[in-house]
Image (cartoon, helix red, strand yellow):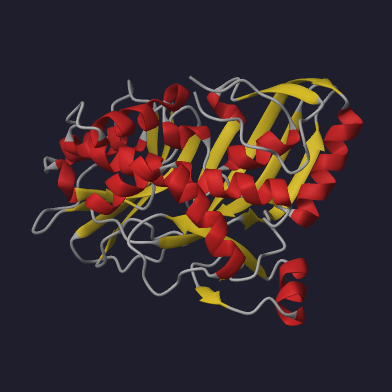
Amino acid sequence: MLPDWPRVLGTPLVNGVLKAQPEDFVVEEVFPVEFSDDGEFDWLWIEKRGDNTEYVAKQLARLAGVQPKAVTYSGQKDRYAVTRQWFCVHLPGKNFPAWEVPESETWKILRKGRHRQKLRLGSHRYNHFTLCLSDLAGDIDDLNRRLSTVLVQGFPNYFGEQRFGHHGGNIDACRQWFAGEIKPARFERSMYLSAARSLLFNELLAQRVLDGSWNTGLDGDVYALRDSGSVFSAERDDETIARLASGDIQPTGPLFGKAGRLVVSGVAAEREAAVYTQHSNFCAGLLKHGLSLERRALRLIPQDFQWQFTGNKSLELSFSLPRGCFATALVRELMNYPLAS
């Protein structure tokens, strides 16, 4: 089982349901595309319902008569949801396929075009979410206060439960793999490595939530520009504190790996070292598999955050987050909900 990592606003006083149906969780890549109308790549804007990204990629390869490796996408999207994202199929020397999707499928092509450039992993910067939280019961005034606070203050950038598998199964499997008890398939290895790094990050973030430094910074921190991959070291002086208060910059936590130039120092380093000591088995395994240190913002402030109550028991949310960030991390600050299986 995964830890119940601490919330900034404490335990919510409202219970509800997330993803009562796929239409309650809509995700769309924010990724404007201008086609060159020539080249070797077909780009397809696809809406899927109840399918994972890899499944759709394999079906596109089958329709085009190419190997699965010829199909690329920018990011993995939730399965139990309605999602819209770009796929790309490499078709050198081939005509433009008809792209007739069988009626039995639960995905469809909304737009298509030809491009000179290949779609690469991580190409889009943001995802836009439209969520419906249903069957609300409890203190709605508390929920309203939380909404107003998240709008201004943001929320901890935890990795969501999806990253760890059902009941944390990816973490358990990674622990067994590092101990030499199992030999996972190649596609499973990257999933387990990601889960281990995400666990270390969440554990560090949990400590920073408890001591209140998740959004105020510590001496020796490395910072990230808001919603940007750009990170830098800075003294925690009046200017840094002001930029933190405005949301212009965020403290960062580690995606563990071999240290590069962007390492923390002072108090921040002591906090991270304590987490590494507690989870030394995962650290040793990650280093063995050659991962390099990266940094990730500890705080997120949602863009274009809007909400409205629909009736007495439902709440609709609309917001955008940088790619790789989890809408469930926001929702868990608002209400209690059962984990998806």
Q: Residue at x 34, y 25 (%)?
A: 105
How many callouts does the rendering have?
0
- Residue 90 is left or right of residue 162, and the answer is left
Task: Give above or below for 316 relative to 300.
Answer: above
| Observer-nearest of 149 and 95 | 149
Furthest residue in direction left, as rendered: 93
Q: Position of residue 309 (x, y in %)?
A: 82, 32
Whether residue 194 is visible: no
Residue 206, quarter of picture: top right
Residue 104, quarter of picture: top left
Task: Give above or below for 195 relative to 90.
Answer: above
| Observer-nearest of 114 and 310 | 310
- Residue 208 is left or right of residue 72, and the answer is right
| Observer-nearest of 139 and 127 | 139
Residue 8, quarter of picture: top right
Q: Residue at x 51, y 56 (%)?
A: 272
Q: Position of residue 59 (x, y in %)?
A: 24, 33
- Residue 2 is left or right of residue 305, and the answer is left
Furthest residue in direction right, as rendered: 141
Whether residue 332 is visible: yes
Q: Position of residue 283 (x, y in %)?
A: 35, 48
| Observer-nearest of 218 and 154 | 218
Q: Residue at x 50, y 30 (%)?
A: 81
Q: Residue at x 53, y 67 (%)?
A: 228
Q: Position of residue 68 (x, y in %)?
A: 17, 41
